[in-house]
Amino acid sequence: MTSAEAQRILETALLCAQMPMSLREMRTLFDDEIDADSLRVLLERIGSDWEERGIELVALAGGWRFQSRPEMRPYLDRLHPEKPPKYSRAAMETLAIVAYRQPVTRGDIEEIRGVSVSSHIVKQLEDRGWIETIGHREAPGRPALYATTPQFLADLGLASLDQLPPLSGDGDAPGAQVLSTLEAQASLLDEDQASLPLDDATPERESPPAAEAAPTPRDAAPGDSRDAPLRTCDELPPEERP
C-alpha cells in the first residue's frame, strides 16, 4: 500500500466517523500494518490539505476528527435559526468550578458558589457525560470527588484542560470568574449539546417546593380567604353548597 492510498483511506475514515478517532482505531483500520508515527505523518498531510477549506482536522482528547471552522458558524447557523435555550447559571457555575478546580467535592462547589448544589444538576452533568466520580475524599462521609471527562473536552473542541482559557484574576469571586470564563468557551459546544437545557433553576437558588411556597390554612389570617386552598363542591359542608 502506497502512502497516498493510506492517506486516502484514513481521510475517508475520519470523514465518516461519528466520534473522534484514536490512534488505536486508526491502526486497526490498517490491521496494524502502519505504526503510530506513520499515522501522525499522514494526519499532518491531511491537515495541510484542508487548510484552505471550511473544514479542519483537529486533535481532541479522544482522538482526531473533522469539524467546521469557527468562521463558518454564522453561515451554518442559518440552516437552524432557532436559538437554543441558554444554560442556567447554576448549572454553568457547577460545571465551570469542576473544570477549573477539579477534583472537587459537592461541598467544595457549595463553598465556592455560596449556595447549595442541587443533586439534579450534578446528575444531569453526569448523564450528559461531562463530569464523573473519580474517587472519594478521605473525610467524614467520604464525599465523592468530581472531575471532567474526555467527552467534556471533545464537546468544547479541546485536546486537554490546559487549553481552557485562563481565569481573569481581576479580583472577582471565584464562582463568577469560572462562570464567565467557561461561558466564553461554551460557544464551541455542538448544536445537539447546546440545544438541551441543563437546569431550570433560578440563577442563585432553586425554587422552594410548591408545598413550602403556598401557606397552609392555619398560616392564613382569620377570615382571610385569599390564601385558603380551593375546594370543590363535594368538599363543602351541605349548608354551604350552592
Image: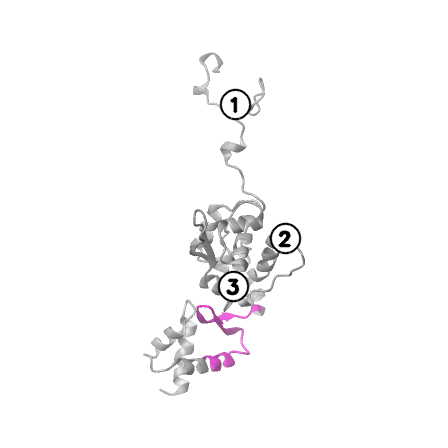
Q: Is residue 23 left or right of residue 105?
A: left
User: What is the count of numbered marks?
Assistant: 3
Looking at the picture, tell me which residue is in the foreground, 196 or 239: 196
In the image, what residue type sits under mark 3? Leu
Looking at the picture, tell me which residue is in the foreground, 73 or 129: 129
Disc 1 + disc 3, Cβ < 8 Å = no
Q: Is residue 213 left or right of residue 23?
A: right
Q: Provide the residue designation for mark 1.
A: 217
Residue 150 in sight here: yes
Looking at the picture, tell me which residue is in the foreground, 181 or 74: 181
Q: Label 3 vs label 2: CA separation?
A: 24 Å
Instruction: Please name the residue shown 53% across and 22% down the image.
Output: 218
Residue closest to the far bottom: 2
Quarter of the image holding residue 101?
A: bottom right
Residue 61 highlighted magenta (yes or no): yes
Looking at the picture, tell me which residue is in the foreground, 35 or 235: 35
Residue 142 pos. (x, y %): 43, 50
Segment tinted magenta in the rendering: 43-70
Instruction: Return the mark for residue 173.
Output: 2
